[in-house]
Image (spheres, rainbow, N blue to C red):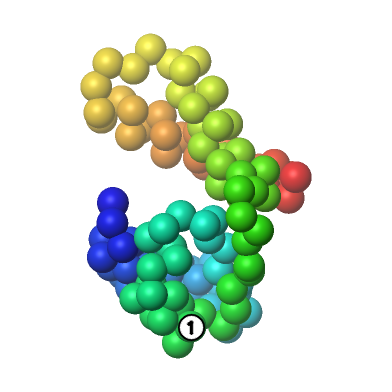
Amino acid sequence: MNKYVYLDILKRNLKQSASNLGISRHFKLYQDNDPKHNADICKLWVLYHCPGVIKTPAQSPDLNPIEHVWDYLQQKINEHNISNKQELKKHLIEEWAKITDHFAQN
């Protein structure tokens, strides 16, 4: 992925996702310090389209909540005997749906 692909993802998904969650006017975007996130073209788009951005200290993976979610999903997926992409997708969707509010808050 590069900055242009990332920007396209933001354009196609960020506002719609915030709307679906009912937080369109009050969300804050959290990004790590990946170079594509800090690319000028992406930072400029975010400046004009996001109500807020959470600043991330350099080298702070523990503060990135999605890293914990990916780890959790990886552990859950490893519990299944998956042999193809369809099964992987099915199990990822199932395990994602099982993530509780309590897990997300922690």
Find residue 92 and report its image quarter: top left
Seen from this angle, which residue lies furthest top?
A: 81
Residue at (60% x, 78% y) in the render: 52
Residue type at numbered disc 1: Leu
Quarter of the figure with the C terminus: top right
* 84 over 101 or under it: above or below: above
Give the secondary structure at mark 1.
Answer: helix
User: Foreground residue, 93 or 47?
Assistant: 47
Estimate the x, y position of residue 99 in percent, counting from the top left. 60, 40
* 78 over 39 or under it: above or below: above
Residue at (61% x, 39% y) in the render: 68
* 76 over 59 or under it: above or below: above
Q: As drawn, is 7 to the left or to the right of 76?
A: left
Residue at (56% x, 47% y) in the render: 66
Q: Can you see residue 78?
A: yes
User: Foreground residue, 100 or 31?
Assistant: 31
- Residue holding disc 1: 47
Find residue 67 and report its image quarter: top right
Residue at (38% x, 12% y) in the render: 81
Q: As drawn, is 23 to the left or to the right of 19?
A: right
Estimate the x, y position of residue 51 in percent, counting from the top left. 57, 82
Q: Can you see residue 15?
A: no
Seen from this angle, which residue lies furthest front?
A: 58
Q: As drawn, is 102 to the left or to the right of 49?
A: right
User: Foreground residue, 75 or 47?
Assistant: 47
Estimate the x, y position of residue 36 in percent, counting from the top left. 38, 60
Q: Residues within 10 Å of mark 1 (few under 14, many from 20)?
A: few
Number of numbered tags placed on the structure image: 1
